[in-house]
Image (cartoon, grey):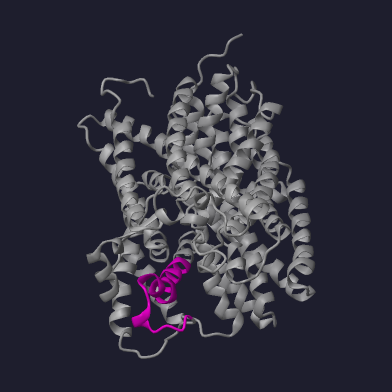
Amino acid sequence: MERSPLKLPENAYRKLNPGETYDPVVPAEAPLPEATPYSVTLGIIFAVIFSAAAAYLGLKIGQVFEAAIPIAILAVGLSTSLKRKNSLSENVIVQSIGAASGVIVAGAIFTLPGLYILGLKASFLQVFLSSLFGGFLGILFLIPFRRYFVSEMHGEFPFPEATATTEILVAGESGGDQARILLGGAIVGGIYDFLVSGVGAWKEVVSSTVFGWGHRLAHNVKLEFRLNIGAAVMGLGYIVGLRYAAIIAAGSFVAWWVLIPLVYFIGAHVPQPFLTHSGLTISQMTPMQIFSDYVRHVGIGGIAAAGIIGVVKSWRIIAGAFKLAYLEITGAHHAASGETIRTQLDLRMKWVMTGILVTLGAIWVFFRWGVTGHMSTAIIGLAIVLVIAFLFTTVAARAIAIVGTNPVSGMTLMTLIISSVILVKAGLTGQTGMLAALIIGGVVCTALSMAGGFITDLKIGYWLGTTPQTQERWKFLGTIVAAASVGVVILILYTTYGFGVPTAAHPHPLPAPQASAMAAVIQPLMTGQAAPWLAYLAGIFLALILEMIGVPPLAFALGMYLPLELNTPILAGGLIAWFVSSRSKDEAVNTKRKDRGTLIASGFIAGGAIMGVIAAIINYLGKEVFAGPKWTLASALGLAHWSESSGGEILGFVMFVILCAYMIWDITRTPKHDTSGS
């Protein structure tokens, strides 16, 4: 018997009336296939691919794209192409397993590359285990709160990413068309970014200093314009949208075009190096050096303060979540609700508690023999992980439920500061202290990232009628695969490019901006150096002022500590999103164009990031296996010097303009009367 066409109920997104219930797309009494060999295998494949892509992009620009939407599009497209029937719940599992990639990557790359930046060589096992244990804790801590966020608060939270992913999964045949659009964007973005990062056809980061007037401005008043011309970065800006892109860019403009010239104006009269380890006076520094040594710390303080503000604003949710956890653990909530239907089945609480205890025990063993070497400091580290990860789990979930953005970096910065202060008091300092603080931060960061991402999966399953218990079980597999993948990719990218500060071995490292910020925070605390507390304090007050006037402090502060070249293309992408969605007087046309652009931008991100990883693997193999440490694909093709020349830099400007023009053309070329959804 053929099922009727699937569609979301009318009350899927609104609050329920008294006595009204929500009936999911797939009825509780008539389930579709969920965890099958097809869905599990495809989910694992996507977890590996998108872990590599997200790690490369995040280390390069400080932003990790959410993999849920591209994976959902590809899953629907594949099931349509293979003519699989009744595959909706299978695709939910594919998306849930594969989406572990983005959240695990965020937890790892925001912290662990800081070990390399500080001169500490992290092993694969340390990266893998910190990501694995953090991911497990994020899953286990969130399960008691699933009913509150996805069922009891039905219609209260918008869940923007879950909404978009759900619409894609339900779309059916139109999802196949969407997959083709995304694939076209991936091909264009992948080829473009491979020509930049792999071949060296033109320069990747262009600057106003390539022109005579720009060089004079940078030298005389420390004013400089910088732009990363990558397709993936610009595509990310499109998805972020103009509002948040403008706020992030505004923070960057304040840092680069206000504070850096101000620091130079005052510091140019100081005849010796001041609060820096570079050995240079301020008058001798480039704008980038002034940014790294002075201005960036204001952004770090702002991010930490934004995390605290988020906790304070969410205290009622945290208190309610503690109550709900108690009711779930004691079984009182189940007894009161009487819900036993398939679509409300979670893992049994005794297994959740057992999983938490086993994971905490494994973390203690890891800290004791793999990190600190002392029983007391391992216990302290475990306590920090337990308290902060559990406390902030609901904050992360609520942030995703409301705005689709998880302020995990600010909460992790706070964790690092707390960890460093406590560990120093316990007598753990120096390199061992920095290693312990960053590993603790990595576990917490991954746990919070997983909690925020997993609530999206569970909300999708709630709307569509997938069994929560099935999602919860198979999320552990996605976490294992993603943690292993990110461990391998981080080691390859470090060997190929390096992270953070340029060195003789790695003259053009991946910026790893969040990890650089984390390293900058803990180094003075652990080595007894003077920390830039006044700069942190300035950032804290700035965040408070921004909160008072209604500007999201986290986005603004993030812009202040990300390099300028990473924020200008994000602004360009946001401007394109605004332009194509406001050009027509017909709102339906504007919406159609905006949605098409989202698919193209997602393709740019996925294709550019994946090709960046492929370029890194080629260069890694060339260095390690074939031609020695100085070999790159660009040098083998004779383009290394060209890409760094003024001609290659000017060509980079031109190619970025062409890329933006192509994206606008591709979005708007669909005839206005076409309503096909393609």
- Relative horizontal placement of residue 185, taking residue 465 as reference (left or right): left
Q: Position of residue 546 (x, y in %)?
A: 34, 65
Look at the image and tell me in which quarter the N terminus lies.
top right
Tell me if residue 66 can be seen: no
| Residue toward you, 226 or 209 | 209
| Residue toward you, 305 or 661 | 661
Q: Position of residue 49 (x, y in %)?
A: 60, 41
- Relative horizontal placement of residue 410, taking residue 552 as reference (left or right): right
Look at the image and tell me in which quarter the C terminus lies.
top left
| Residue toward you, 522 or 133 | 522
Identify the residue at image location x=22%, y=32%.
584
Dominant SS type (magenta):
helix
Specify whether residue 202 is painted magenta.
Answer: no
- Relative horizontal placement of residue 210, taking residue 457 as reference (left or right): left
Image-quadrant location for residue 534: bottom left
| Residue toward you, 211 or 552 | 211
Tell me if residue 361 can be seen: yes
Q: Residue furthest top?
A: 1
Q: Is residue 84 above or below residue 149?
A: above
Q: Residue furthest bottom?
A: 271
Image-quadrant location for residue 660: top left
Specify whether residue 291 is painted magenta.
Answer: yes
Question: Which range of residues does the magenta coloring cover?
Answer: 278-305
